[in-house]
Image (cartoon, rainbow, N blue to C red):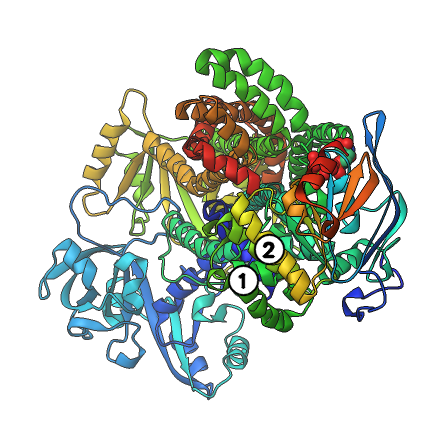
Amino acid sequence: MTHAVTSPDRRPPRRDAHALLAVGLHKRYALGSATVEALRGVDLAVGRGEFVAVMGASGSGKSTLLHLLGLLETPDEGRVEIDGLDTSGLGDDALTELRRSRLGFVFQTFELIPNLSARENVLLPADMSGAGAAGRERLARLAAVLGIEDRLDHRPDQLSGGQRQRVALARALINDPVVVLADEPTGNLDSRTGHEVLRLLSHGVRELGWTVVMVTHDARAAMQAERIVFLRDGEVAGTLHTSDTDVQAVFERALGG
Amino acid sequence: MPILARLALRNLLRHPWRTMATVLGVGLGVAAVLATLSVGDNVEANVRDTLQAVSGPADLIVTPGATGRAVMAAAELESTVRADPAVVWAVPVLNTRAEPERDAEAVPGSLLPGIDSGFQLGGRLTELDTTLPFALSEGRLPRAGQREVVIAEGFIAGRGLNIGSTVVFASQAGPLPLTLVGAMDDRVALATTNGGRVGVTHLQDLQEALSLVGRVSHLELQLRPDADVEVVRARLQDAVGDAFTVTYPAGVGDAASGIVQTLQAGLLILAATLMALGGFMAYNTFMAGVVERSREFALLRTVCLRRGDVLRLALAEALWVSLAGVTVGVLLGLGLSYGITRLNAVVVGFEFRTLVVPAVPTLLAAAVGVLVALLAAALPARAASRTTPLSALRSVDDRTPSWQVALGWFLVALGALATRLPWSGMWALVGTALAMAAFFAGVALAGASLIGPAARLAQPLLVRLLGTPGRLSVGFTVRNAPRNGVAIGTVIVGVGLIIGVSAMVTGLNRSIAAWVDTTVVGDLFVTSPVPFAADFATRASAVDGVDAVSGVGLRIVRFEPEGVPRGRSVVLVLVEPERFDPEAGFGALQYVSGQGDAARGFEALSRGGAVLAANTITDRFGVGAGDSARLRTDEGFRDFQIEGVVVDFTSGGETFIGSMLDLERFGGGSPDLFVLTVQPGHRPSEVREALLAAFPDAVLDITLNAEYRAAILELVRRTFTTTNMLLMLAALIAALGVANTLGMNLSRRAFEIAMLRTLGFRRRDVRALVLAEGLTVLSLGAALGVAFGLLLADVIVSGAEALTGYVIAPAIPWRLLVAAALLTPAIGLIASLLPAHRASRLAPRIALGAAERA
Ligand SMILES: Nc1ncnc2c1ncn2[C@@H]1O[C@H](COP(=O)(O)OP(=O)(O)OP(=O)(O)O)[C@@H](O)[C@H]1O
Ligand SMILES: [Mg+2]
């Protein structure tokens, strides 16, 4: 199962490579007798310290793309490189180890483990990759940045939505990942709390060197990114740099394509 | 604690009730196994303790060669023994049965002959007070030549006796008046034995009174502290020769072993099945946990866990459960063992003294518990580790693949077939296990395909009873089919087991009843705590209304079957041949076909030197008509020709029937029991009165035939109390399994239920919905379980026959059958009350939120 690259956990990051590189991604799903082509040849390069938003109509393939980038599914064609490492053909264990050491995930529905405290939730990936001590140090700093220091000993059901998402964000970042992948992280939050989370993300990208790929339906959320990639029918329909545009334009682009 | 272990523990604590149910399921199984395995040790320990107490400070005892009943000349033996340098003292003891005077009504004695010895009067050299196995709580020791006695204090109080007064004992030599001079402390040694019915007088006085001067029952020896007891024992045995036995105080007799073995063997089947049921239950719960947390597993897979980590996480939960289960089980098992031992104490007639915790059975039961829990967790754990990261994000309805359904039906057919095969001997156990395993697995897999039709069949009734919730429940039940299949499997195995075992028990009861009917012939049964006078039979025949009088001798003798090194103690029933004369006798025996008949048996008994064997002896030791049995007589081991095999349930079935002509070979003395018939026209109860009047000095216990039968059957019933207790545990585990399944169906459907609540379902509608599901599942399970139980009965009976050696004709327990068919759904309903209540309490909003997060 495991390939030549047996312990991606311990490889030093390569400074010269893209944080994330997707080349010619194709993904098809069999739906009964029909085949749905969710992605048809998507290329995407994300540099270190970049904040990229992905937008597109419902069913355009945003989540599918994120799953492929997150090594949760394998592409039918094309390849995904993380930190310069080609992930094609890696076995399940190797993929898992890559996910927990190089990637962070944030979901629309938070997905915290209900019977672990916030602290334990955050530390879980660190503990599992044997980096518990380093994790605890990072947790102190992350908690300060994310403003959840006094919430660490609460269980998820004792936290508000915004707090939960911030805990989830801390969990995504605990192993110092190369990229954080977020699928509509603000979708379940009211606009103020959502904005708060987004502010934290862009602050992290600017000040702390995080790299984020975020799927969103919200044009204002997308404006926090540096670059917006539009998908349509499984293809990249264009890219906008937020410095060159405004919310209204993004909104229209996302709607009409 | 490692993070995975901690996570596992948290997961378990999240559902405390469910976890407790699982722990209890595993625990009950462990308990049943432990109790069954340790009963033997406990009975043995108690019997040994009792025997130890009787002889107090003695290290060794010397008894007459063949039986413990005969007396022996002491003088020469004493000097031989004393000559050994390791012997510090050797004291002679004479024991006799002598009944202190009592009021007219008989004292109910134990029914098992040869074990209850009535009041035990011992003659000892009381001036050697360091050799005495008792302590005084009041008064002083009896002196030689004064005809004095000390009695256990409890007995003194019970009979209202006073120190200083005279107690008249009925003895084999007539009334024996003794002055009560002291009370024995009830808490120590001798006074704790024989139910406190013990007294001690001076040896010489007793010898004189019984005309047994110079004769004793046994010698008690104390050795020097530095002596190697076994070496001395062997040396002494050589010195005294074959006519005597030098043995440890606790080594006398193991009369109880046969009965215990029978009981233990019967329980073992049950215990194994309970363990299996506990395992199914654990499987059920673990699977529930996996299904319920599939989203969580998917997340963990996404964020940090490899497949192997998930597998280990799931197994860690099983490990926690098994640890808790084993702890609970060991405690429960010891309690159960205590109960069963106590019960045996009553049935067999020994005193309950200690509870031993045997190491090997405890470890074995614990290991079985852990193994079963881990096995039960294996499949669910694998399922959990196969969760893909993305499965969380798509809701996939669980559907059983058609190959699994096919495999399920194949297994069901295999299980049914397994019950039909002619398993014999110990293989029947394998057959039982196989049939049950195949049936359960089959139903768990194929049950899903049964549920659809069954639910639709039930629909009209449910709609009628419950309205819309009834209709909706059909869909619910069908969609939860895979889990409901497991629940149905649990119910089937539970109900099937109960029916199967009951068929065995009912069959055994019938067989015993039939044996009692054929064998317990005669109108009056006369026993006495005091040996009968030599002319009892002649004098009794003269009593008005008495027709025939036939004596019965009961002896516990050593039987040495081939391949059993130390041999076993068996019961030898010595009968007067005339009673079994096919022409003129009133007695009858139930011959096993092809193994002798009444004519040959009568001929053998009239000739002497031959025996009839109980069928259990044949089954356990492989000897039958035409073989010979080595029995220990006063002159050492001797071969007795076996002339027939008869059904006999006495003493766990390890019984021989011999001729009274051989009485002298087995210690001599008088018969222990007389069977009397009454002349036509006389009422047995009147004849009883006449007999009591005719023997004013003898202490007679006279039982009417009906009373005797009732007492035997009562004894059987009591013996099966344990079985019934275990069966109830089985029912309990099955009910827990059902509640568990419904609970887990519920958490899967929390979202839908919340929707229904939002759409206008009242609380009681939700309750009805869940109850309807439980009812459908349980009724289906009960129906199939009854069918399975009937199939299973035959295998269980063959298994029980193989284990117990009894020959049993299975009988259908009709009443239980109907009860099971009706009660199971009722129990299921009760079991589903909690989940139903919980469902109805779900507030719409909370449930929606839960479904989102779950
Ligand atoms: N497992 C699957 N099986 C079949 N079809 C799928 C599967 N996953 C996605 N699809 C299809 O692929 C296409 C892209 O789906 P995807 O979930 O990526 O869209 P999306 O852009 O995230 O939409 P939304 O904004 O609604 O979340 C859709 O047509 C969807 O139906
Ligand atoms: Mg999506």
Q: Is residue B131 visible?
A: yes
Element class at badge 2: helix
Q: Splitting the image into 4 quarters, where does residue A37 fall?
A: top right
Label 1 resides on the chain identified as A
Q: Crowdedness of circle 2 by 10 Å Cα count: few (<14), some, many (20+)?
A: some
Q: Give the spatial CA distance, label 2 vs label 1.
A: 22 Å
Q: Which residue is mark 2?
A: A199
The location of residue B298, given as percent across then percent down, is 67, 47
**Quadrant occupied by the N terminus of chain B:** bottom right
Left or right, B820 with respect to B364, comes to: left
Whether marks 2 and 1 lie on the same chain: yes
Q: Splitting the image into 4 quarters, where does residue A252 fall?
A: top right
Query: Of the numbered discs in the image, which one, if any, rests on residue A202?
Result: none
Tell me which amino acid carries mark 2. Answer: Arg
Say if B28 sits above or below A6 in the image. Answer: above
Say if B342 sits above or below B757 in the image. Answer: below
Mark 2 in CB contact with mark 1 (< 8 angstroms): no
Nearer the observer: mark 2 or 1; the answer is 2
Label 2 resides on the chain identified as A
Which residue is drawn at the image coordinates 17% and 42% (left, top)?
A: B104
Mark 2 or mark 1: which comes first in sequence?
1
Q: Is residue B666 visible?
A: no
Tell me which amino acid carries mark 1. Answer: Arg
Query: Of the numbered discs in the image, which one, if any, rests on residue A119?
Result: 1
The location of residue B478, given as percent across then percent down, is 61, 24
**Quadrant occupied by the C terminus of chain B:** top right
